[in-house]
Amino acid sequence: MRDGVYTLATMSSATPKRTRQPKPLAKPLGKLDGRLGRSERSRAAVAEALLALIDEGDLRPTAPRIAARAGVSLRLVFHHFKDLEAVFADAARRQLAEVMPTLRSVPADGPLPARIEVFVGERVRLLERVRTIWRAARIQEPFSTEISRRMTLIRAWLRNEGERVFQRELERYKGADRQELAAALGVAGAMATWDDLREHQQLPVDKARRVVARSLTLLLRK
């Protein structure tokens, strides 16, 4: 965690591997760098194509549609990714990597109304940015171990961040009461709640944001 803001690294439970001594390059460095650059551009094009299709409402894009949108061959897609699950995971990672560094640190002290305002502003900015890929991920989640693992980590991060910001209010309660309040805070700031407000209740961003702020205010005011 850096200055109260969790980075993507905090969402990973992977154990760092021991660094190995680099082997001598078998080919000239310039050629190797160029090949790696092309590979990364191809991977990025495939991931961006997936995100674009999802943004347009295609929540279960097929490999041929992804390849066509990326302007690459179907064979190249599966040269860089072992399956569609890997494409999806890489696209989600890239989108989060773009969004997370833009979030501001939310203070855990100061007046409650000010904390709610900043917290809701940052939470809405994150949830609105990733809403479409989250909806697509929920479709894939029951069938993908990797996507399920990532979704679990992100849900935990969302809950933990809310508990950190409103720790002072949570400390007023003990036992089951505290657990229930923490659970209610988690629901108020959850992606599922935001998606319901935006997709099913058809609220514009400003109104949906006020609903979340009102919910937190009613929960935390004593």
Image (tube, rainbow, N blue to C red):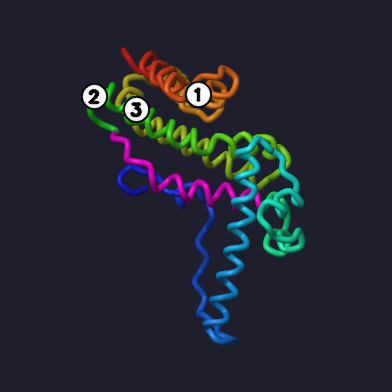
Q: Is the Cβ of the residue at disc 1 closer than 8 Å to that at disc 2?
A: no
Instruction: Give me the disc on residue 166.
Output: 3
Mark 1 lies on residue: 187
Where is residue 27? Give x, y as percent.
59, 86
- The image quarter containing residue 148 is top right
Where is residue 18? Give x, y as percent.
50, 69
Spatial CA distance of label 1 from label 3 is 14 Å
Q: Amino acid at mark 3?
A: Phe
Which comes before the other along the chain, label 2 or label 3?
2
**Is 71 drawn above or below residue 95 in the view shown?**
below
Q: Amino acid at mark 1?
A: Val
Magenta run includes residue 98: yes
Residue range highlighted in magenta: 87-107
Is residue 46 found left or right of 202 in the rendered image? Answer: right
Is residue 89 found left or right of 142 in the rendered image? Answer: left
Q: Secondary structure at mark 3?
A: loop
Task: Write the residue at 38% across / 28% down.
Answer: 120
Q: Is the Cβ of the residue at disc 2 closer than 8 Å to that at disc 3?
A: no
Where is residue 13? Give x, y as percent.
52, 51
**Residue placed most toward the observer, 196 or 105:** 196
**Is 196 drawn above or below residue 47 in the view shown?**
above
